Image (spheres, rainbow, N blue to C red):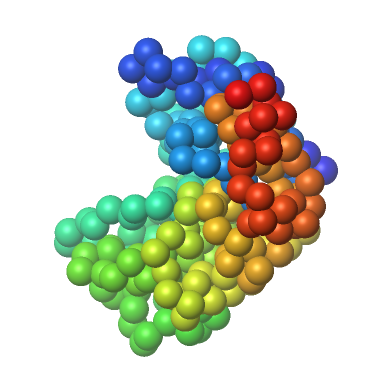
Amino acid sequence: MTILEIKDLHVEIEGKKILKGFNLVLESGKVNALMGPNGSGKSTLANVLMGNPKYEVTQGEILFEGKNLLSLSPSERAKLGIFLSFQYPQEIEGVTIGNFLRTTLNSNNSENKISVMDFNELIEEKSKLLSLPEKFYERYLNQGFSGGEKKKSEMLQLLTLNPKLAILDETDSGLDIDALKSVSNGVNKFMNENKCVLIITHYKRILELIHPDKVFIMINGKIVQSGTSELVDHLEEKGYSWLKESDGE
């Protein structure tokens, strides 16, 4: 079942064209990897899907479960079940991970708010799944966190908020092998037949722990190749030059 459909999407920022006729279809129950060289538009896509106002959509449409996302605010998109894990999560002073997540959950589900007791049980359960230190969620959001701790915090957010579509923008960037395993474990535990993941990455190593059903290669603002995980091995061996040639560059 199609969960996300992007048709002929054109996006620019400050007059510079980034996405140039981008098309993509994602299905429920599938893990997808989006790869490509720096500057190809991968992070732009993630920001546009979440509704970052810095990016101007000049053409095309984005449908999430048949609903037009372009008319919705970032908070409305989150309520529909879209989650973005940032490459560089920001520190927020004075707000604990737990308070942030409970507030977000209740904002997304205003008609069925979760009690403090039920929330504590939920976040304890998700923390154990990720093998996080005891009371990790009582720390201030990303404040003083290492790179690995920030990414683990994002995985705790993912499991607790339980969205339908998770967009992971270079979540594996800068992680040591233990942190990478923890993050991968979180994504694997999140997935089921009703969920969808889009992993944006430069590296093969996370795709050895989270096995993608489909791999998309993005160059110069559009998808130029798609295939199975074997495509990742091909990139590892040959790089992107052969794709650039086939794209007419």
Q: Residue at x 35, y 71 (%)?
A: 149
- Quadrant of the rendered image containing residue 181: bottom right
Judge left or right: residue 213 versus residue 114: right
Nearer to the camera, 203 or 100:
203
The mark total stands at: 0
Residue 178 visible? The answer is yes
Instruction: Identify the residue at image location x=35%, y=26%.
Output: 54
Q: Is residue 156 left or right of residue 3?
A: left
Q: Residue at x 57, y 13 (%)?
A: 59
Query: Which quadrant would the C terminus be assigned to in this image?
Result: top right
x%, y% of residue 157?
Answer: 45, 62
**Along the line of sight, which residue is nearer the eye, 203 or 83?**
203
- Give the image location of residue 214, x and y in percent: 75, 50
Residue in the picture at 47% in, 58% down: 171
Furthest toward the bottom, the residue is 134
Residue 178, given in percent of the width and then of the height, sits at 47, 80
Screen quadrant of the N terminus: top right
The correct choice, above or below, for 99 with respect to 18 in the image is below
Mark yes or no: residue 63 visible.
Answer: no
Picture layout, residue 235 above or below residue 25: below
Provide residue 168's location: percent of width, then percent of height. Answer: 52, 53
Indicate whether 61 appears above or below 156: above
Name the one closer to the observer, 105 or 56.
Answer: 56
Extreme-left residue of the structure: 94
